[in-house]
Amino acid sequence: MNRPRLLDAVVRRRALLKTLAMAAGSAALLPVSGPRAAEPAHLNVKDPAAVALGYVEDASHVDVKKYPAYAKGSTCENCSQLQGTAGAAYRPCELFPGKVVSARGWCSGWAAEL
Ligand code: SF4
């Protein structure tokens, strides 16, 4: 290989290595994503706060003897304490900060939407 061709090959190789290094660096900056990456933990029905308010994941399992004020059809989905995006299966609740509750759930803190 003559000198100009060798120099040209070295320059191209360096350019390729530089491009690969920049691509690897860019990939490292990409956010880690996934369906549950940022979602808070689901409220556990055995959590002391959940037990205190009779939280259930499915409103059809409400103990109506213990909670006679329960009105059939009331769920987290139609409670004024529920926050977050409508239609999501689990959403934040004002009564259980840092956790998400089932939209189909219920607790004795239920309050009608105005
Ligand atoms: Fe569900 Fe309302 Fe109880 Fe929160 S306060 S857990 S949204 S029923």
Image: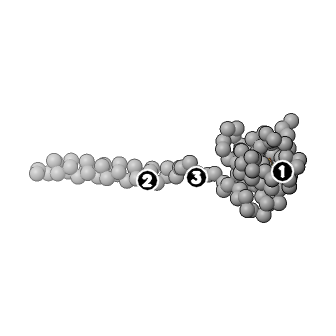
Query: Residue shown at 31%/53% (left/top)?
Result: 17
**Pointer 1 with pointer 3, Cβ within 8 A:** no
Is residue 71 left or right of 99 when viewed as pictured?
A: right
**Residue linked to disc 1:** 64
**How far, Cα to Cα, is label 2 from label 1?**
58 Å
Q: How busy is the neighbourhood of tag 3: few (under 14 within 10 Å), some, or many (20 plus)?
A: few
Assign a secondary structure to mark 2. Answer: helix
Query: Residue 54: image x %, image y %?
Result: 80, 56
Amino acid type, callout 1: Val
Amino acid type, callout 2: Gly
Q: Which quadrant is home to the C terminus? A: top right
Assign a secondary structure to mark 1. Answer: loop
Query: Residue 88: image x %, image y %?
Result: 66, 42
Q: How busy is the neighbourhood of tag 2: few (under 14 within 10 Å), some, or many (20 plus)?
A: few
**Residue linked to disc 2:** 25
Query: Residue 3: image x %, image y %?
Result: 14, 51
Is residue 42 left or right of 67 when viewed as pictured?
A: left
Q: Earlier in the sequence, mark 2 or mark 1?
A: 2
Query: Residue shown at 77%/48% (left/top)?
Result: 106
**Residue linked to disc 3:** 37
Is residue 93 visible from the viewing direction of this image? no
Closer to the observer: label 1 or label 3?
1
Is residue 4 visible from the viewing direction of this image? yes
